[in-house]
Amino acid sequence: MIKGKLHNFALRFHRDRAGLALLEFALSAPIVLLVGCYGVELANLAIINMRVSQIALNLADNASRVGAYSNLATQQLREVDVNDILQAARYQGANISLTANGRITLSSLENVAQSYDTQPVQRIHWQRCIGARGGASFNGQFKANVATTAGSSADEADKGYDLPLGISDNGSTPIMAPGGAGVMYVEINYRTKPLFGTWLTSPQSIHYIASFVVRDRRDYSKIWNPEPASTPSTCNLYTP
């Protein structure tokens, strides 16, 4: 008797289709959610890469244009100009916390004969930085700032860092300044923060460079800092 009831119950349970869709959804939802979240992370990473790349290009472009004209029809690049374009890059990257989670290095690669040179020399005359992150993964590859005053005067003591072969980013084709001119070279290093934490994807290191030849006839003797003087964004400072 009991055995027959159990058999009948098993047959009814086997044939019962009530709640099947709900059961299938409960089983498949975690997989769909996992794949969806991973897709969102990949899309976010692609967008961040595009934004950082565009910020590097915009900063190099802006740095190649700014300056105040002097009486000699040359442009004098001032500390306030450099600070302005670095702040513009910070605002552009505010929605991804670019300067809080990364580091921007702006270098002036010049092929100019200074008053203490006998011929033009490829050198990083000065560097300026913005960003709170430090260390080997974030600081620029090439450091003109053997002293924080590099490029701030026309003296040989502040000449910067000679690079006869130009700047090569991790073995790539070297970037060299044309004769009598300069190149604004930007390097951005940034560490991403995953949207859903590290359980799905780990933080990624993003590295982009950009360069533009200086557009105008610039005075390459130094970075000018007339009154009221601005605080130089030297690369020993780490501020977001």
Image (cartoon, rainbow, N blue to C red):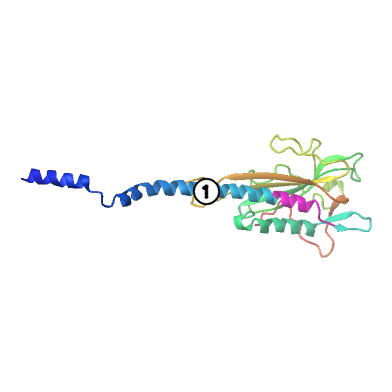
> Left of 189 or right of it: where is 176?
right
Q: Is residue 58 magenta?
A: yes
From what the image shows, is residue 174 above or below residue 68? above
> Left of 198 or right of it: where is 236?
right
What range is drawn magenta here? 56-67
Can residue 24 be seen here? Answer: yes
Q: Residue at x 84, y 50 (%)?
A: 215
Q: Residue at x 17, y 44 (%)?
A: 11
The furthest residue to the left: 1
**Could you say which quadrant of the image residue 225 lies in?**
bottom right
From what the image shows, is residue 148 above or below residue 175? below
Q: Residue at x 69, y 51 (%)?
A: 55
Q: Position of residue 128 (x, y in %)?
A: 74, 51
Residue at which label 1 appears: 41
The furthest residue to the bottom: 228
**Could you say which quadrant of the image residue 111 lies in?**
top right
> Left of 204 or right of it: where is 110?
right
